[in-house]
Image: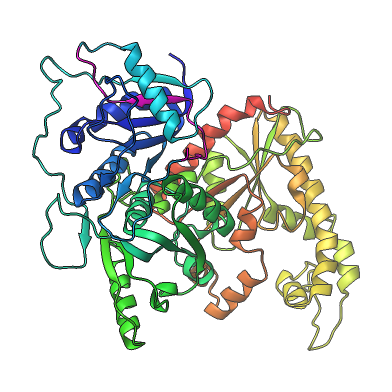
Amino acid sequence: MAVFRSGLLVLTTPLASLAPRLAPILTSAARLVNHTLYVHLQPGMNLEGPAQPQSSPVQATFEVLDFISHLYAGANVHTHLDVRILLTNIRTKSAFLPPMPSSVQNLAHPPEVVLTDFQTLDGSQYNPVKQQLERYATSCYSCCPQLASVLLYPDYGPGELSVEPLDVPLPSTIRPSSPVARSPKQPVRGYHRGAVGGTFDRLHNAHKVLLSVACILAQEQLVVGVADKDLLKSKLLPELLQPYAERVKHLSEFLVDIKPSLTFDIIPLLDPYGPAGSDPSLEFLVVSEETCRGGMAVNRFRLENDLEELALYQIQLLKDLCHEENEEDKVSSSSFRQRLLGTLLRPPHESPELPSCLYVIGLTGISGSGKSSIAQRLKGLGAFVIDSDQLGHRAYAPGGPAYQPVVEAFGTVLCLCHPDILHKDGIINRKILGSRVFGNKKQLKMLTDIMWPVIAKLAREEMDQAVAEGKHVCVIDAAMLLEAGWQNMVHEVWTVVIPETEAIRRIVERDGLSEAAAQSRLQSQMSGQQLVDQSHVVLSTLWEPHVTQLQVEKAWALLQKRIPKTPSGP
């Protein structure tokens, strides 16, 4: 069967009956769609009548909100699908509702196939029904000219064609601020303007629930705060966060798709309160279980500033049934970023000047990141490791290629402010030399102009040794890899990241430095973000050693798969 890029799923079964059948319906849809699956709710619609069916409003009740949550939760099983539940025909009970749109809605990805759970009496792909489905879909949404149609039939047993409501309410996932118990059939109130906030990194199904509820509640404008700058510092693996502009782009596309009648004001969220704490025209705020306390803090802040409290709507977190041991048990952007560790983030360099039978990895990271331990793990998997620090020691040694140039450049000044850089036995005192260049850009450049070309030459000699030993992967362990401009010496840059606070703790413990000295050392290097921005693979030693080992093994296995595909591969 053909695989379609995007599709439109029209659900016609009443929600109470549909809920237990969602999993097989989504599974059937996932076999036909490999990109975006739009979902249109039209319970009770008949496709077998002679007249073309018309889109009709669906009353927004708490049952509908719960159904949306459960549908997105079920979609987590199909990770390749970008599911979007269209809300245009879902209406709250409000006097200020705009009229139903009569024009065709343009979607970001025009569907190539329209699917439905509608069941013909004989269980067949009844052609007139399919034609009605196609006409209905194209009357509501922009679709591809050659739209195909499919009637989905999950594997129901005999006698299971009934669509009578089961009268079994869905588990509650939405809690309004009012302490009064709600019933599933209770209509949802509509508001003129409201707000929702979050990081919205790699927009996932939990985000979509949060945004969908906010879009149903809002009738005119929705203010969306997107965390930026200082609010990102505490995030796990912040180096792998999508840039603000990219997050806003994906967010805007999703919002306009699901409810184009709304005006969206997407703004950077730079403090915990944002516009929700100061905008007098806002009426509600949608929060998650995690951010509910923050929502209550916003209301306290508003009261202190003589503003009315916002109606709070709390969304239950979606459980992630496929999370790893070091990941959160909820659907989370943090887990998505963790899963990027060890994967290829951008195409490798083409480096024809490197040995044709050797694939070279440049391994870097801030001080204290655990870079050297990663290098040893790669060595254990079969890589030839070149330690640039050891090459530096060789270069500095008497008779080494950098010895005489360094001595001539920095001299043997015998005074208290500039002590001799040589020990009595003629060996370069690297501690004295380091104190001479540290914090002095001119002196540091003088030293690196000598050392970096020398170390690069020694590294190339080591690569020849790797080839002689029959190695296929070589790792250059170099803290200053990017600063030295050695990108042309490697096919891929691998960076090890760690939070700065953890790096400082490790440096203090390892080298006996003060926290201030450790922090000063980090400030003299490229930041983790700067390194990641130029990297192909990112790793982290933040977790237990066995987690790091699994991460490195994953990166190594993926590397083996792509080496033959590169021009310089074996």
How does the figure colour the protein chain or chains? rainbow
Magenta span dominant secondary structure: loop
Q: Is residue 167 above or below residue 1?
A: below
Q: Quadrant of residue 97?
A: bottom left
- Judging depth in this view, the residue of 125 and 287 nearest the camera is 125
Instruction: Find residue 291 and report its horizontal and vertical position in percent.
Output: 32, 66
| As drawn, 447 above or below 252 | below
Quadrant, the C terminus? top right
Residue 134 shown in magenta: no
**Residue 216 or residue 396, whichever sits in front:** 216
Q: Is residue 329 depicted above or below 130 in this figure?
A: below
> Residue visible at 86% across and 81% down?
413
Q: Quadrant of residue 174?
A: bottom left
Q: Nearer the viewer, residue 224 or 498?
A: 224
Residue at screen point 73% across, 72% down: 434
The span picked out in magenta is 103-121
Residue 487 screen position, x and y as percent: 74, 47
The quadrant of the rendering that contains the N terminus is top left
Residue 514 shows in the view:
no
